[in-house]
Amino acid sequence: MCREAVRKGNRIAVVSTFETSLSPTRNTLRRVAREMNRNVDIKEVLIEGGFGLESDKLKFLMVEKISKVANDVDVIIFTQGSMAYCESYIEEKLGKEVLTNPYFSALAVKRALLEKGL
């Protein structure tokens, strides 16, 4: 997910409902950017109070918070797999590509299985 985000642009929004997941994702993005010889500008968006919200309320809160940085970023990533169901909604509302971990994790598993001939 982080590699794809760096490929897509140098201005990346990192979105989470937990403050503790922002730092590891930010650090991974910076490491990946160094490996790819790219510079990144990372905007962190904490969806305070978002964890455990009913899905429609979470989506509304996410649009509210992410819209504050949407014009300043090329791509948005969600730090938590539990937010993946909001991906297409946020893309539609804000007009920005959203990347989520479950998709890229599934691709990695598929590649590993194919490499093993399974």
Image (cartoon, rainbow, N blue to C red):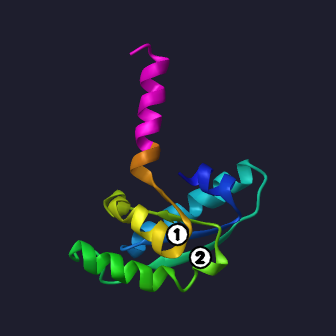
Side of 55 where 75 appears, left or right = right
Percent across and percent down for residue 101 are 43, 52
Residue neighbourhood size for the residue with mark 2, other residues' Cα within 10 Å, grouped as few (<14), some (14–19), many (≥20): some
Q: Which residue is mark 1?
A: 14
Q: Helix, strand, or loop for circle 1?
A: strand
Amino acid under label 1?
Val
Percent across and percent down for residue 83 are 35, 64
Q: Residue at x 65, y 52 (%)?
A: 32
Whether tag 2 and tag 1 are in contact, CB under 8 A, the answer is yes
Quarter of the image for residue 2 reads bottom right
Q: Residue at x 52, y 69 (%)?
A: 14
* Bounds of the magenta segment: 105-118
Furthest-front residue in view?
A: 92
Percent across and percent down for residue 25 are 51, 62
Of labels 2 and 1, earlier in sequence is 1
Mark number, residue 108: none
Q: Which residue is mark 2?
A: 43
Query: Majority secondary structure of the magenta segment?
Result: helix
Quarter of the image for residue 80 reads bottom left
Residue neighbourhood size for the residue with mark 1, other residues' Cα within 10 Å, grouped as few (<14), some (14–19), many (≥20): many
* Vertical arrangement, residue 44 with respect to residue 77, above or below: below
